[in-house]
Every structure is written in C-alpha cells, then in structure tokens.
Amino acid sequence: MAAFTSFEEEALDQYLEMFGKGRLASFSPIAGGIENSNYFVHLENDGETSEFVLTIMEDHSFAEIPFFGKILSRLRHFGLPVAAPETTLDGMTSTTFCDKPAFLFRRLPGIHLEIVNEHHCEILGKFIASLHKALDGMEESRDNPYDFTWMRGTLDIVKERLSGSQYSLLSQVIEEYAEIGAAGLPSGLIHGDLFRDNTLFVNDHLTGVIDFYHACHDLLIQDLAIAINDWCRTEDNQMHTPRRDAMISGYESVRPLLSEEKQALIPIQRVSAARFALTRFLSGDPPLKNPTEMIDLARTIEDHDK
C-alpha cells in the first residue's frame, strides 16, 4: 500500500458525508506498496471511533471498479475474511474521490506476518481454495492482464535491462506458460497477488485478506504458485518443502487438485516469478522493488525441479 494522491481535509470531509458513518477525527497515509493510494481514516459517531481504509485507485479505470466491489461483496457473503466496500447513503459502493475511483473499507484487524510456519501456510491454502469455490460461477469476470501475450510484449520492452541469460530464462518460462495455458487446466477467478503483505493475522488466525486489484480469470493454480513463491521461500531463495506441502495440503482439504495441476505447479511457480519480475521492471528505472530477486527465484525453481 502507498499514498500517491494527496488532498485537503475539507475534501475528505465532503467525501465521507456520502457514507453517513460519522465525523472525521483523523486520517493518515499508509506507507508501502507501489500501486494505489491508501489512507487510514478514523470516524467518530456518538462518542465511538471506527477505523476505515480509504483506497484511491491510481491505475484502474472507472469501468473496472464495479468488478472488484462485486468480488469482495461475494466473498464477504460466503464468510471469508475480506472487507467489502462500504455503501453510501445512496447505495453505491464504487465512488469517486480526487477525480479517481475510490473505495471505503472498514479496517480489518491483524498484522502482516514477517515469519511464517507450516500452520500459516495450511491456513492460507484453505483460504485460496475457499476463494476459488466462492467465486466459481460468478457472472462477472476480468481478462488476465498478465497473460503470456503481455509477458512476451513486456519482455521485449525491458530487454535492454536484462543480461543474456536472464532474457533466455524469461523467454523459456513464457513459452512454457503458453503451453500450459493451452492444456485446459481448471481456470477461474483468482486473487492474483497473495503475498504475505496482503494478509492479516491475529494469534495465528487469518483475519483479513486485502488488495484484490490483480483479481482476474487465470489458471487456479496460479494463486497457489504466487503464494508458494512468497510464503514458502527461504532467505537464500530456496523452496521450504514442509511449508509448500502444508499449503498444498490445506488447499486440497477444500478443493482437491487434478494430477495435471500438480504436475504443472512447479512450472507455474516459475511463471509467477517471471511475471512479478516483469511488473517490477515496469515500476520504474530504477524499479521500486528488485526484479532480479524474482528472476533468481525462477532459476532456482527450475534447478529444484531438475
């Protein structure tokens, strides 16, 4: 999370009047992240203070925003620990602030985990499968903005910033993704960004999953691959097998994987690493996050598979 858009308190006051949740007591920017602007907002109502999160969308269009709101509302309906957008007095969840799309959420309890264990991974695996089942059959969808066509085009854009071996590795992974994508593995709506800093825990209990703005239609195992690469990686960029096994076990306790999905999981882990390397390159020059870390991970996963 981050705060790229700034504003005056009076403007926020006027915006919050649409929700009727109380009087603005204070607000502060949330540091970190590389995409949307986020603020903690404290409202007072009848002597009680409530905490909210204001998210201002920096890159998504107004046309995309209802999709994210519907996903969150559906997951909340199914009892999953996500924050559905607050509704205005006129019944709207998608709103405009600073001439940009915006959501207001009630703040979820918990903290981001810095150290994870097998128990945490099992819990997350169950959540991912529950999310996939809850979103199955949803009429609204969103095309994958990071498919292999995008990856090929982006690789050409950043080619001059890569070594020969890095370019060769990423090219190979992208072609592998194209082949797997044509194999007809189960697909559906996924979260698409399940890193540790998009989850909240209280006493080893998952209390919140946030940042659904990469949600799209993709291979279901893409969510597992993204999470495994972050949650099950050691400090020296190796896979921690017990944590990886625990996450897969947790997932399969809700939705068993096909044998073809299990075979494709390692290759899709490489795809995930390559995808995030490319998005990091696009964040700037120098990048806001280190893309080489993800390229090295893709290479390590390849060596692990051999």
Image (cartoon, grey):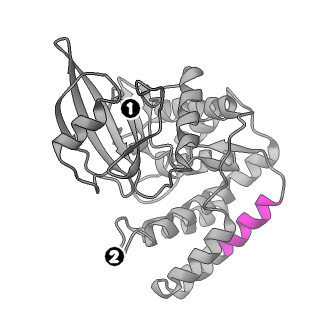
* 150 is higher (above) or lower (below) than 182: below
Query: Which comes before the other along the chain, label 1 or label 2?
Result: 1
**Left or right, 125 with reference to 21:** right
Asked whether residue 173 is drawn in magenta, I would say yes
* Residue linked to disc 1: 105
The residue at the point 17 percent across, 47 percent down is: 8
Number of numbered discs on residues: 2
Residue 78 horizontal/vertical position (percent) = 60, 21
Residue type (three-letter) at the residue carrying disc 1: Phe
Position of residue 41 measured from the top left corner of the image (x, y, whole percent): 24, 34
Instruction: Please state the extent of the stretch shown in magenta in the rendering.
Output: 172-182
SS type, badge 2 = loop
Whether residue 38 sits left or right of residue 158 in the image: it is left
Asked if residue 227 lies left or right of residue 253, the reply is left
The answer to which of 245 and 278 lies nearer the viewer is: 278
Residue 60 position (above or below residue 86): below
